[in-house]
Amino acid sequence: MTDTSQELICVGAITGARGLKGEVRIKSFTADPKGVSHYGDVTDENGENSYKIRITGQAKGQLLARLKGVEDRNAAEALKGIRLYVLKSALPAPEEDEFYFSDLVGLRADLVDGGNWARSRRCMTLEQAPFLRLPAARKVSLWCRLPGASCRKLI
């Protein structure tokens, strides 16, 4: 079994600045949008920068937040596009029949006749339904909806 305790899970992304005092807008990727701040400090993809998040509100489907050390609009704007990560070990264990999207990446997809087709490359939500990206012929990928799954079952 692979040790996933050091695996980083993306919980959100900074989409821009709000106001003049360093507030940022965050698109949350957690089941509860405010969950982006429930698992301790977040880091960038490389783990080089760490941020303590304080949620200040919500607007237009995004969170408004202050990040410790970000004091003005210029600093907030410089963070636009940064994806926010936590260690997988900081997240609660999924309930029965629930999965983290990262657990579905790399799963084998089989053909109806039992033959091996491909391994999933990505999982994402499209129109409130979970989809897996599977490689196909001629450098084309297929997005396959997970039958019987709802986004509530995928954290």
Image (spheres, helix red, strand yellow):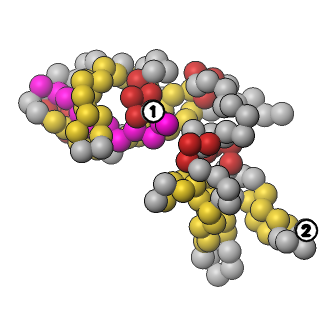
**Picture quadrant where residue 71 is located:** top left
Assign the N terminus to one quadrant of the image.
Answer: top right
Q: What residue type is labelled 2?
A: Gly
Q: In this view, does 137 lie above or below 128?
A: below
Q: Position of residue 108 (x, y in %)?
A: 79, 57
For label 2, the SS is loop
* Farthest-out residue, left: 20
Provide residue 90's location: percent of width, then percent of height: 58, 21
Q: In which quarter of the image is the C terminus?
A: top right
Residue drawn at (26%, 34%), measured in percent from left and top? 58
Residue that protrudes farthest toward the bottom in the picture: 138
The disc at residue 114 is: 2
Query: Which residue range is magenta in the image?
Result: 21-31
Gap in angstroms between the C-alphas marked 2 and 1 = 38 Å
Instruction: Say if the magenta span includes residue 5.
Output: no
Q: Please, what is the three-letter code of the amino acid marked with disc 1?
A: Asp
Q: Mark 1 points at which residue?
A: 32
State the SS at label 1: loop
Q: How crowded is mark 2: few (under 14 residues within 10 Å), some or many (20 or more)?
A: few
Question: Residue 88: horizontal and vertical position, in percent?
Answer: 60, 28
Residue ID at (90%, 73%)? 113
